[in-house]
């Protein structure tokens, strides 16, 4: 199910969500995260250098880091993720055209949801691990508590507005397996 994303989420309760502007960022991020004992990174597709940065980080540090690609919103991006042999894929949402390809990719993945209907749709597919995004806009910790009472079999990785001041509140919840945020790379 979801190509064993559970293992990555369980072993990495804190997942840095980063953008890479150039090759110098790769080494800087590696050093910052290594100093904090973090061995997992989600590199978002928000810059022109993103794919090159993912390939470079994977080549240089993939032996000790789980390297994921984030902000995946198309089939083309899934194909490129397969080509680069990333360790996991993160999408901000869920589309019908991406479902089958994500499952067939053999790459662990997690798709984003923000409403009960989206959670129910993911449940119909058989997915139990979901990204809650953007967490701060859609109710934060209070929404996670409400979803926990309704969707007891679902585990979430909230992102969006998670920071040093609130991440522990999320991780205390039974239905939160990990959190993602950019503050980890600062």
Image: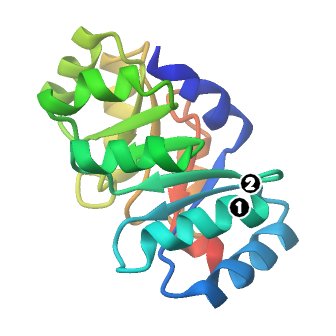
Q: Position of residue 158 (x, y in %)?
A: 43, 47
Name above or below for residue 79 compared with residue 128. below
x 58%, y 63%: residue:
55
User: Which of the labelled discs sits on residue 62, or is there none?
Assistant: 2
Where residue 87 sits, quadrant-wise, is: top right
Q: Is 40 left, or right, of 89 in this rendering?
A: right
In percent of the image, x 32 and y 60: which residue is there? Answer: 136
From the viewer's perspective, tell me whether residue 68 is left or right of residue 100: right
Identify the colour scheme used. Answer: rainbow
Secondary structure under badge 1?
helix
Residue 5 in percent (x, y) is at: 55, 29
Q: Is residue 42 above or below residue 186?
A: above
Is residue 132 at least partly visible in the picture?
no
Vertical placement of 169 versus 94: above or below?
below
Q: Is residue 80 visible?
A: yes
**Residue at the front extreme, as displayed:** 83
From the viewer's perspective, tell me whether residue 24 is left or right of residue 38. left
User: Residue 67: x percent and y percent?
Assistant: 62, 53
Contact, CB < 8 Å: mark 1 with mark 2? yes
- Dot 2 surroundings within 10 Å: few (below 14), some, or many (20 or more)? some
The residue under the point 20% across, 18% down is 120
Which residue position is annotated with label 1? 59
């Amino acid at each position: 199910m979801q190509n064993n994303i559970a293992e990555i989420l369980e072993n990495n309760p804190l997942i840095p969500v980063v953008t890479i502007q150039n090759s110098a960022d790769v080494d800087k991020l590696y050093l910052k995260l290594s100093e904090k004992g973090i061995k997992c990174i989600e590199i978002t597709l928000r810059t022109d250098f993103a794919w090159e940065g993912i390939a470079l980080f994977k080549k240089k540090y993939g032996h000790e880091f789980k390297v994921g690609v984030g902000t995946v919103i198309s089939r083309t991006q899934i194909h490129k993720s397969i080509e680069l042999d990333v360790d996991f894929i993160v999408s901000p949402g869920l589309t019908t055209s991406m479902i089958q390809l994500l499952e067939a990719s053999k790459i662990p993945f997690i798709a984003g949801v923000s409403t009960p209907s989206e959670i129910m749709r993911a449940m119909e597919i058989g997915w139990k691990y979901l990204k809650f995004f953007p967490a701060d806009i859609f109710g934060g910790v209070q929404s996670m508590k409400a979803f926990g009472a309704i969707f007891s079999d679902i585990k979430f990785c909230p992102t969006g507005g998670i920071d040093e001041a609130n991440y522990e509140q999320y991780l205390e919840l039974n239905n939160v397996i990990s959190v993602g945020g950019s503050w980890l790379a600062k």
